[in-house]
Amino acid sequence: MTKVLLVEDDERLSTLICKFLSDNHFIVHPMNNGEGLLQEVQKFQPDIVLLDVMLPGDNGFILCKNIRPHYTGPLLFMTAKNDDFDQVLGLEIGADDYIIKPVEPRVLLARINALLRRSHTPVKPASNKEQLIFGKLVIDRSTRTALLNDVNVQLTSHEFDMLWKLAENPSQLVERETLYTELIGREYDGLDRSADVRISRLRKKLQDNAQHPYRIKTIWGKGFFFVADAWES
């Protein structure tokens, strides 16, 4: 059974989510604040973390930063703030998706299942290659790791999938709509910035130039372009 770690201080909402997910065959471990969250992640070994943004003590953004070096599975923010800044910030610091409160249980379930599908079913390349090498960058699908200049690049499961999708199509346009349907699990609505934020995170981790990217380029209005010969140094 899939294990869910829920961090939510609203007792009524936490009870509702726990019951609904339990009825749908999930094992749910609830917490009403983030104290000791890292220890619980390491002990419980969740398949997915549901993390409220506004919590007593450390807020969800701080907690996400704290656990991300130790937890690479999917993380979903729940936020009562329908604000682009909050949503983008959450994605930038390591969340895989977000949902706005009040939470509709069936919508939450759909989001969870979409994240779990992407996490448990890695993107498969068109070829049978398990390893892609571009200069000093080595991407290994069998171990789901990436090395740059012989140093391991710490990627979440979803970040690895996005990198692999781009790298298996080197020097070719990968359309934004493709990333949404194949990796994020929903249609692109023209406004959602989830893909752009994940690309931004990848650039930082892969030592690309944030202001003038030369390794993963954005083709405005279309998608993204993995530059095959930009990894020699």
Image (cartoon, grey):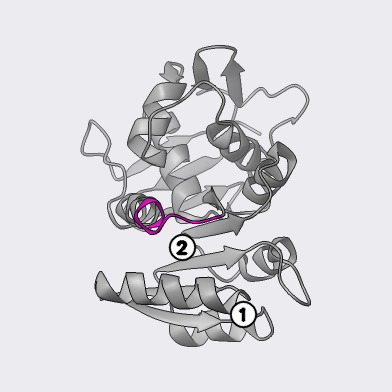
- Per the image, the residue denoted by label 2 is 73
**Label 1 is placed on what type of residue?**
Leu
Residue 233, compared with residue 24, is above or below; it is: above
Q: Local crowd at mark 1 within 10 Å, few (<14), some, or many (≥20)?
A: some
Quarter placement of the N terminus: bottom left
**Label 2 is placed on what type of residue?**
Gly
- Per the image, the residue denoted by label 1 is 38
Q: Residue at x 43, y 72 (%)?
A: 16
Specify start and end residues of the magenta stretch as a single range.
102-108
**Distance from Cα at disc 1 to Cα at disc 2:** 13 Å
Q: Is residue 106 magenta?
A: yes
Horizontal and vertical percent position of residue 211 = 78, 25
Q: Nearer the viewer, residue 121 or 132?
A: 121
Q: Is residue 209 left or right of residue 28?
A: right
SS for callout 1: helix
Horizontal and vertical percent position of residue 145 = 45, 54
SS for callout 2: loop
